């Protein structure tokens, strides 16, 4: 959520940023500014009335102490009037404040100046590419056929148990999944991220704090009886560890990592492009989260990008990095880099990580602050990234590492899998 002061003082910059996102409700900004002025006027008048009432109460007390009851009782009439006026003002202020809050929740984050203009993923900017695209043998298979051939993943059994998009991992497929989780966590903790285990369900306040609610409500699984949501990413519970917290500057930066299953309804997703592991309703992911002083956030983002690059280099997977355009940027993000690996068998790029900075957008919603060295309270900047999402990493490994003899496991994973080949 954008800070009111920022909107007031940077109206034109806010509107220009929203235009880069192709956001059409630009009149919301002037409405917010007008309503904010109304709120401040109502607050000033309320403060004035409360001060008057307080002074009258003191004066009445003095008069009673002097034995001047008649004068004191006369002033009580004025006190009653002020009390009624104060109540009306408090109710009006509450309505205005709530309306202002509701309007602010509809406004997405402002893109960083480096974000390119554009309407969709076709306009994203490729900024880096690594690795040669492998040439597979003539009878190479897509990952869903490899999974069936080597009895690694059973999609039909998952459909029987739950429904489409809930695969069952078996044998070496399950061990590969566990190996990747442990490898990612080990790489993250070695880089200074603290491992945290978090709940897999969150309440409304947590969903709102990181921006999933109300923006992505239809994409989340909702447990109605308890009003809880299954997490779409570990970012939600990890970041909400610090909701309503005032940090000291010496506690920053905060660097966290966690493994969780992730649940996404992915309503309307169907077709060949979502076959196999390409898009699931339940999948495993290891996440990294950072909480930073504003002046260090961009360098922290570059460090996170470099960290994911190192992991993909060790896995020896060909990949590229995209800077998302304004039209493809997430609601809460100011700047996002997407990592994609190339699936040679499918002849397409598969997104396997997003690394983003949100500036103070999430911190405003979370009411997450820190005190600088002078004791001034300020909003932190929050960042997060997939490090990494497993399904498409597994798909890329199965497809790109296949040989006529079997699937070769990258050397870095062998200590975790306990085997070098899948036969």
Image (cartoon, rainbow, N blue to C red):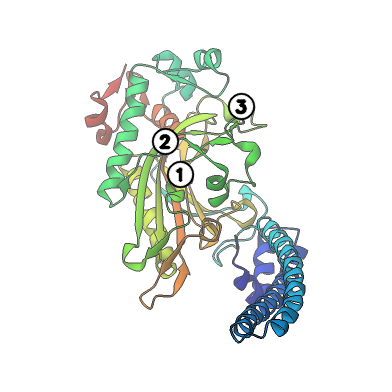
Q: Which residue is drawn at 51% across and 59% down?
A: 367
Of helix, strand and loop, which one carries label 2? strand
Image: 148 above or below 361: above
Q: Which of marks 1 and 2 is in front?
A: 1
Residue bearing mark 1:
237
Q: In which quarter of the image is residue 87?
A: bottom right
Residue bearing mark 3:
272
Q: Which one is nearer the viewer's eye here, 54 or 216? A: 54
Is residue 309 found left or right of 219 in the rendered image? Answer: left
Image: 166 above or below 52: above
Q: Pinpoint residue 274: horizontal percent, then vertical percent.
A: 58, 29
Image: 207 above or below 379: above
Q: In which quarter of the image is residue 300?
A: bottom left
Q: Residue furthest front?
A: 67
Q: Earlier in the sequence, mark 3 or mark 2?
A: 2
Q: Which of marks 3 and 1 is nearer the N terminus?
A: 1
Is residue 131 found left or right of 240 in the rendered image? Answer: left
Residue bearing mark 2:
260
Q: Pinpoint residue 181: horizontal percent, then vertical percent.
A: 34, 34
Is residue 74 found left or right of 394 in the rendered image? Answer: right
Q: Do the residues labelled 1 and 2 touch (CB within 8 Å)?
A: yes
Q: Distance between the residues labelled 3 and 1?
A: 33 Å
Q: Which residue is drawn at 52% across and 14% down?
A: 161
Q: Which residue is drawn at 57% across and 19% down?
A: 163
Q: Distance between the residues labelled 3 and 2?
A: 27 Å
């Amino acid at each position: 959520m954008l800070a009111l002061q920022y909107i007031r003082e940077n109206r034109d910059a806010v509107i220009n940023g929203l235009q880069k996102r192709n956001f059409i409700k630009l009149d919301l900004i002037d409405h917010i500014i007008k309503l904010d002025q109304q709120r401040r006027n109502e607050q000033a008048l309320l403060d004035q009335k409360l001060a008057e009432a307080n002074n009258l109460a003191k004066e009445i007390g003095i008069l009673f102490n002097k034995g001047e009851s008649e004068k004191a009782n006369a002033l009580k009439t004025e006190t009653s009037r002020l009390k009624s006026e104060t109540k009306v003002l408090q109710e009006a202020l509450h309505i205005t404040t709530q309306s202002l809050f509701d309007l602010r929740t509809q406004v997405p984050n402002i893109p960083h100046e480096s974000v390119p203009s554009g309407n969709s993923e076709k306009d994203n900017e490729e900024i880096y590419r690594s690795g040669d695209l492998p040439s597979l043998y003539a009878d190479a298979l897509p990952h869903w056929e490899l999974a069936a051939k080597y009895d690694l993943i059973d999609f039909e059994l998952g459909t029987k148990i739950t429904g489409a998009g809930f695969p069952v991992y078996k044998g070496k497929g399950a061990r590969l999944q566990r190996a990747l989780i442990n490898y990612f966590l080990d790489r993250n903790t070695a880089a200074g991220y603290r491992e945290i285990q978090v709940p897999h369900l969150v309440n409304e306040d947590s969903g709102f704090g990181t921006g999933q609610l109300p923006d992505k409500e239809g994409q989340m699984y909702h447990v109605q009886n308890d009003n809880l949501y299954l997490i779409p990413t570990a970012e939600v519970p990890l970041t909400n560890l610090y909701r309503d917290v005032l940090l000291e500057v010496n506690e920053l930066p905060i660097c966290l990592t966690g493994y969780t299953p992730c649940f996404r309804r992915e309503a309307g997703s169907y077709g060949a492009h979502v076959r196999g592991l390409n898009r699931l309703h339940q999948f495993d992911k290891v996440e990294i989260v950072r909480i930073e002083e504003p002046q260090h956030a961009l360098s922290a983002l570059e460090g996170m990008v470099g960290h994911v690059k190192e992991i993909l280099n060790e896995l020896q997977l060909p990949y590229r990095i995209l800077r998302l355009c304004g039209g493809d940027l997430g609601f809460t993000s100011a700047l996002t880099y997407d990592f994609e690996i190339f699936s040679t068998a499918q002849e397409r790029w598969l997104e396997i990580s997003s690394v983003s900075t949100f500036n103070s957008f999430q911190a405003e919603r979370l009411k997450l602050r820190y005190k600088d060295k002078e004791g001034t309270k300020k909003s932190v900047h929050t960042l997060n990234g997939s490090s990494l999402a497993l399904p498409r990493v597994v798909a890329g490994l199965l497809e790109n590492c296949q040989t006529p003899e079997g699937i070769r496991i990258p050397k870095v994973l062998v200590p975790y899998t306990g085997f070098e080949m899948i036969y």
